[in-house]
Image: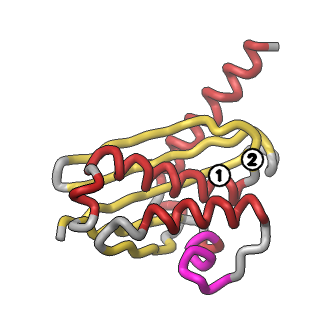
Amino acid sequence: MEKIKVFTDGGARGNPGPSGIGVVIESAGGKKTYHEFIGHATNNEAEYTALLFAFQKMKQVFGKSKMKSLSVECFLDSELVVKQITHQYKINGENIQKLFFQIWNLTVDFGKVEYFHIPREKNTEADRLANLAMDEGTRSQSQIF
């Protein structure tokens, strides 16, 4: 089984507020990074959206036929999201529940998926990308007005 490491981060300025996500996907083929402004959201919505984005991107990159042969390790600095996604904590918010189910439906196509909580200082690249997305999104919104 090919091992894939995924580092994700999401953030919101103002919580809720302008939000962005950062994703790093490491595989035998190398490392790919992504960032995206997601509009107005909470921190938790951004964290979930980053994870959802990562699974959608892996599905595109590796293709459905190869997904069952992948072992995915997901590293997040949000302990809350890790505990919710691994069924240790209950999910109350409707928006978060929707994101959770979208992620859950994507994960069944992979061979193995594990989640790990890591300290923020071990997630610096995904954090930097999420902040870059927020900066770019905020800058482009201010140019509109």
Q: Amino acid at mark 1?
A: Ala
Q: Residue at x 68, y 42 (%)?
A: 19
Bin the neighbour count of mark 2 within 10 Å (Cα to Cα): few under 14, some 14-19, many 20 and up: many
Residue 126: give its label: none
Q: Is residue 115 above or below residue 48?
A: below
Task: Tell me where residue 47 appears, x and y as whole percent.
Answer: 61, 57
Which of 101/141 is in front? 101
Residue denoted by label 1: 46
Which of 60/50 is in front? 60
Residue 41: give its label: 2
The secondary element bearing badge 1 is classed as helix
Q: Quadrant of the C terminus?
A: top right
Q: Residue at x 65, y 28 (%)?
A: 137
* Colour setup of the view: secondary structure
Q: Residue at x 59, y 66 (%)?
A: 101
Q: Residue at x 69, y 59 (%)?
A: 44
Q: Quadrant of the N terminus?
A: bottom left
User: Alpha-carbon distance for marks 2 and 1?
Assistant: 6 Å
Residue 121, magenta (yes or no): no
Q: Is residue 55 left or right of residue 79?
A: left
Q: Is residue 67 above or below residue 92?
A: above
Q: Amino acid at mark 2?
A: Ala
Residue 4, quarter of picture: bottom left
Q: Is residue 48 above or below residue 39?
A: below
Q: Of the two numbered discs 2 and 1 on the same chain, state the one appearing first in sequence.
A: 2
Which of 110/135 is in front? 110
> Tags 2 and 1 in contact by the CB under 8 Å rule?
yes
Q: Which residues are magenta?
A: 81-89
The secondary element bearing badge 2 is classed as strand
Task: Tell me where residue 50 appears, x and y as whole percent.
Answer: 54, 52
